[in-house]
Amino acid sequence: MKPKMIGKIAVDLAMTVLLLLLMAKQLTGDVAHEWLGAGMFVLWIAHHALNFGWHRSLFRGKYMPVRVVQTVINLLLLAAMLGTMVSAVILSREVFAFLPISGGIALARPMHIFCSFWSFVLMALHLGLHWKMVLGMVRWVTGPVSSPVLRSTLRIGGAAVAVYGLYALVKNQMVSYLLLQSSFVFFDFERPLPLFFTEYLAIMGLFVFLAHYGAWGVQRLTKKGKLVFLGDAQKESLGIQTKHWTLGVRYSKLILIYDKQRCRMG
């Protein structure tokens, strides 16, 4: 694996851990929360630097439905993260206390809650849209899952996590924060710490599940990447006479398959 890819994985893992810790402000305390937020800001910049190719390709290539969804979510996440960071600087009493900022707290507090919870949701959706890449890395390390039973078990497990995530979403009143219906975050101090992180991981899993299978459904509907094999009559109508060739269509291009070797036409 290339060093740049290792760097991307390390940054993304660190951002995921920090994201969960930032959602536990009442446990970490204000000072630690501010320093963790500053660390997230640094990692966020590193993430964009390592993935700068995405910015360069924004106005290149064709926009299929999945790419449109990915771009919209990425832009919304960018806006949510900027809103979170700006409001955090205004509210800061430790890390950015040296800045000559006065006032704006009444607006910054609800803005910080609103943007931070949307950042959590949008980061999970962003991860879900790239879940195939995550699975590819796992397969690269562990090898492909050849057992149909194991594949089905993993999918059922993913669905179970999503269902529990929906329960945790409602239990933690996250919808009210996303809709800006509350200016303060309720926290149950009697809840065990492992349960808190389990619930927030499940909520993240819910949006990963929705984004991953939602993108899969859109691809199925648009038939993107689907290989359709043609019968003998259709092959003859296209001038393919030999029985040794198999003709398929993918991405509006012709694919000829002969002895497991593919030759692209068109």
Image: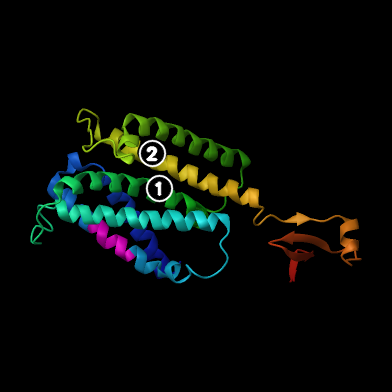
Query: How would you classify the magenta stretch by its main secondary structure?
Result: helix
Place of residue 189 in the rendered image (x, y in percent of width and height, measured from the top left): 19, 31
State the residue position of label 2.
Answer: 203
C-beta proximity under 8 Å, tags 1 and 2: yes
Pick whichever, 82 or 123, lies toward us.
Answer: 82
What is the crowding at mark 2: few (fewer than 14 residues within 10 Å), some, or many (at least 20)? many
**What amino acid is labelled 1 in the image?**
Ala
Place of residue 32 in the rendered image (x, y in percent of width and height, measured from the top left): 16, 49
Q: Quadrant of residue 251?
A: bottom right
> Which label belongs to residue 164?
none
**Residue 199 is covered by the magenta coloring:** no
Place of residue 11 in the rendered image (x, y in percent of width and height, measured from the top left): 34, 60
What is the crowding at mark 1: few (fewer than 14 residues within 10 Å), some, or many (at least 20)? many
**What amino acid is labelled 2 in the image?**
Ile
Image quadrant holding the C terminus, namely: bottom right
User: In the rendered image of this protein, does residue 9 appear above or below residue 169?
Assistant: below
State the residue position of label 1.
Answer: 124
Which of pointers 1 and 2 lies earlier in the amino acid sequence?
A: 1
Colour style of the rendered protein structure: rainbow
User: In the rendered image of this protein, does residue 13 appear above or below residue 167?
Assistant: below
Q: Which residues are magenta?
A: 39-46
**Residue 41 is covered by the magenta coloring:** yes
Q: CA distance from mark 1 to mark 2?
A: 9 Å
Q: Residue at x 87, y 61 (%)?
A: 235
